[in-house]
Amino acid sequence: STSKQHPQVVEGLKVTEPVRRPRHPPWYPPVQNDAKGLRVLNSLTESVEPFAPREGRLVRWYACGPTVYELSHMGHARAYLTFDILRRIMEDYFGYQVVYQMNITDIDDKIIKRARISALLKRFREDFLQGRDMARLVAFTAEAETAAVEALELARIKFSEPLPDTTPSRIKAEREEKQMELALKESQLQKTRERIASATASGNFDELFNAASGINGDLLDEREGQYVTDQSIFEDHARLYERLFFEDMRRLGIRDPDVVSRVTEYVPQVVDFIQKIMDNGFAYRGTSSIFFDTTAFLRAGHDYPKLKPVSERGENDATEAEMAEGEGALTVGVAGEKRNANDFALWKFSKPGEPRWPSPWGAGRPGWHIECSVMASDILGTNIDVHSGGWDLKFPHHDNECAQSEACHMQHQWINYFLHCGHLHIKGLKMSKSLKNFITIRQALDELDVTPRVMRLLFLANHWGKPMNFSDQSIEEAKERERVLRAFFGSVDIVLRKDNWGETQGLNNHDRRLQETWLTAENAVHAALQNNFDTPAAMDSVMGLVGATNRYLLSGERPSATLVRKVGRYVTRILQVFGVVEGTDMVGFATQQGSDDRLLTVMDALLRFRDGVR
């Protein structure tokens, strides 16, 4: 059935003056021009557009949060640290009033599988192996090795089949990426098999159990996953990794969100939201799931997809890999149940071994995309200023979010600005847990000797919207920058500690040159931040000012303490905005040192010492 009402655009957007960019549907910019001069790369147009909130200074911002199934890696740091920097610039530099919401995905195929495997491995060790049965462990591991080799062999055959000459370039590129991923997985399996052989030869039970846990877990899940019925297993797993995620964020100096929303606490609202989409004529029941009807959505005059550029030939179909990514690893569709290949699951009927919640259509769980639509709409409303996430979430995740939300609210534009950060690359492949080519945030901080400040300086030196390499060279450059800044603040401190009122005041030619350099640098930083948050250019200007001040102080002429203080304060302020200098997130009187405060200072020092020892 077609929709019963005509879609519309919320008040405060230019309904009659949409922006039209090649290969994207019309975008409706905010009516107001707020005169701050900020311009941002908006994924909805793939162009740098003038930024303005829809209402006054208020920026409603939704950030796609983590799927909490394992320790967070540097790919996550790329997203959350990058958007922390952008958020700080918006709040602390441009003076916007930001309401920043982040979700926690605590129902997901990856969590289900990982939690099940953890539970099955524990049971396998305690019950089947009776804690120490080496012979049984060796025999089971041999079966798991065979299964793992066969699975990769099947994938190798699938990805070796020649593609027709008429295959679109993006599908060819996707195939190449899959072949690279497969080669990486094959080399990882080879290393696992070597560790297994070594542990088997030495007769070390614990070593073999740990080396084989990956492949043994996969085989156990295939055979016994359906018998895991205790719902608390999934919740406990998610809560543990959620807590560890926020610990990592705090270590990186990332501001807490203003609102955190968990999917498990929103299931009744998800059901209501899906029911509304069905009532509006944009969803239908399949065998395995309730599906979103992309054909009906387009027929009613909506646009889909919005973020994924449609080719000149008008192709907008999802590739096989994109659909698989969007639907999740445990989803096995039934042939012919979808009306269109692009239709996606809103509600999945639970299979044995999966968590379940009641719904009018039968026990199940929310699809991945619907979760964000429901939580963001509840907190931020039917039109949101900014939505951020990793580059790989554009399609299908964010496009599907937009479609569902616009189908529910009967609006033409749910998000005004989409910000997607560039990938983090290691060994030439984007970092991802499923590929296991990742470094956890904890490893980077504790084993690679990368401090939170060095990490932030490294991110500031890379443009937020472009791919970045995490390498020894880039880390060393950030460490050198920190060393230069530390020396600069030391030199400024020496000048300011002296009694400078006995010196000649005013500005001589030497002082005037530094003053001119500072004014030029401040203007350059301002222009860089207005220009799509160009932190590399802003940091270059700051470092140029630091270098000029160092030369000024080394000249042998008397320094102007008032000018040096001004430059020092400016550099400190910009580094505070970027989160490089701490103190901006403290609550309460920070510096007042009355007699009452001395005890607090001592306690604070003791607490910091304790945290440092930890």
Image (tube, rainbow, N blue to C red):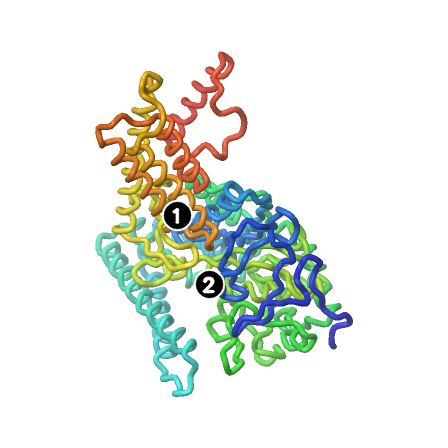
Q: How many residues crowd mark 1 within 10 Å: few (<14), some (14–19), many (20+)?
A: many
Q: Is residue 19 above or below residue 112?
A: below
SS class of the residue under badge 1? helix
Instruction: Describe residue 564's horizontal placement relative to residue 224 as left or right.
Output: left
Identify which amino acid the numbered label 2 is placed on.
Answer: Asp
Q: Is residue 8 above or below residue 598?
A: below
Residue at image x 29%, y 51%? 474
Instruction: Describe residue 290's horizontal placement relative to residue 428 as left or right.
Output: right
Point out residue 227 in the picture as x, y percentages from the top left corner: 54, 60
- Distance, label 2 to label 1, CA atoms, is 27 Å
Q: Which residue is mark 2?
A: 392
Q: Quadrant of the N terminus?
A: bottom right
Q: Nearer the viewer, residue 454 or 244?
A: 454
SS class of the residue under badge 2? helix
Point out residue 490 in the picture as x, y percentages from the top left corner: 30, 29
Q: Residue furthest top?
A: 595
Residue 166, can we see it? Answer: yes
Kindly indicate the quadrant of the structure image that contains residue 370: bottom right
Identify which amino acid the numbered label 1 is placed on.
Answer: Ala
Residue 136, can we see it? Answer: no
Q: How many residues crowd mark 2 within 10 Å: few (<14), some (14–19), many (20+)?
A: some
Point out residue 163 in the picture as x, y percentages from the top left corner: 39, 84
Q: Earlier in the sequence, mark 2 or mark 1?
A: 2
Point out residue 186 in the picture as x, y percentages from the top left corner: 31, 67
Image marks 2 and 1: residues in contact by CB distance under 8 Å: no
Q: Which residue is mark 1?
A: 538
Q: Quadrant of the C terminus?
A: top left
Residue at image x 63%, y 58%? 30
Instruction: Describe residue 441's horizontal placement relative to residue 104 as left or right.
Output: left
Question: Looking at the image, is mark 2 or mark 1 nearer the viewer?
Answer: 1
Instruction: Describe residue 416's horizontal placement relative to residue 278 as left or right.
Output: left
Q: Nearer the viewer, residue 384 or 342?
A: 384
